[in-house]
Amino acid sequence: METRPSPRARLRRRSSPAEIVADELRERILSGTVPDGGELPKLDQLIEEFGVSRATARQACQILETEGLIQVRRGNVGGSSVRVPRPANVAYTLGQVLEARRVTVGDVAAAVEHFEPLCAELCAERRDRRREVLPALDTAQDDLMACIEAGDGHGASLAARRWHEALVDRCGNDTATVLLGTLESVWGAHARATSAELDAAGVPLSDELSRRVHAEHDEIRRLVAEGDGPGAAAAARAHLRTAQIHPTDRRDGNVVDALTIRDELLG
């Protein structure tokens, strides 16, 4: 029996029957036709719908499982739950590539220093920045000050990371949010892991440095609120030279560790 591929699948050459079925199911997942957490058709339903053998239907599901798009439950309650890709998944994959290339954490930090100011500029250019950007920055900033006042160095480091992540997440450009957010996640995962290690070892984070970081956040926030994109970008660029003093900093020669990213972001 022959499969009945979608028009999109027919454009591909030399596709195996399993790949054609996987292509159609992947399209349903990525288009939202099957929502995150939803169920793909059972194996018998796939066999009937696509006119393929059980082995082909199972292989198609294995392709999607390898890609991380579904979680297959085996046994009497078998089935396939959809797992829509998230930036955290991309960050883990990027971490694997960087680790294989022996890229250092300091190299990632340097890239963040170049790209994050773009997000500050985009935040300032949003017409709805007072509603969509500033509250998220203010929440993280309030958490940062509370940790500083409580002498919680590790908590201050985490709050500072949340502020930077909010700056990227609220920039208003989805492509920048995913791409730069992924890079931010790789660096942030290592920063949080190192901060936790230092905290466990009783190494304090500089109170003076934390307060300087808070003050520089306030300045960037002011420029964003005023809609000064170039000013916000320049302030963010200067600030990142301070922020890199937090663990992990740009002098860190350790190679990126994909497992650290997985454990920090995916649990």
Image (cartoon, rainbow, N blue to C red):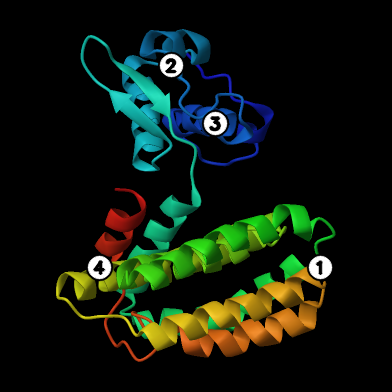
Label 2 environment density (alpha carbons within 10 Å; few <14, some 14–19, many ≥20)? many
Label 3 environment density (alpha carbons within 10 Å; few <14, some 14–19, many ≥20)? many
Q: Amino acid at mark 4?
A: Ala
Q: Residue 118: percent from the left, percent from the top?
A: 68, 75
Q: Amino acid at mark 2?
A: Val
Q: Nearer the viewer, residue 123 or 145?
A: 145
Q: Is residue 79 left or right of residue 34?
A: left
Give the label, 4 or 3, closer to the camera. 4
Which tag, 3 or 1, sits closer to the chain's start?
A: 3
Q: CA distance from mark 3 to mark 1?
A: 33 Å
Which tag, 4 or 1, sits closer to the chain's start?
A: 1
Q: Nearer the viewer, residue 1 or 84?
A: 84
Q: CA distance from mark 2 to mark 3?
A: 20 Å
Which tag, 4 or 3, sits closer to the chain's start?
A: 3
Give the label, 1 or 2, closer to the camera. 1
Which tag, 2 or 3, sits closer to the chain's start?
A: 3
Q: CA distance from mark 4 to mark 1?
A: 35 Å
Q: Disc 2 marks which residue?
A: 52
Give the label, 4 or 1, closer to the camera. 4
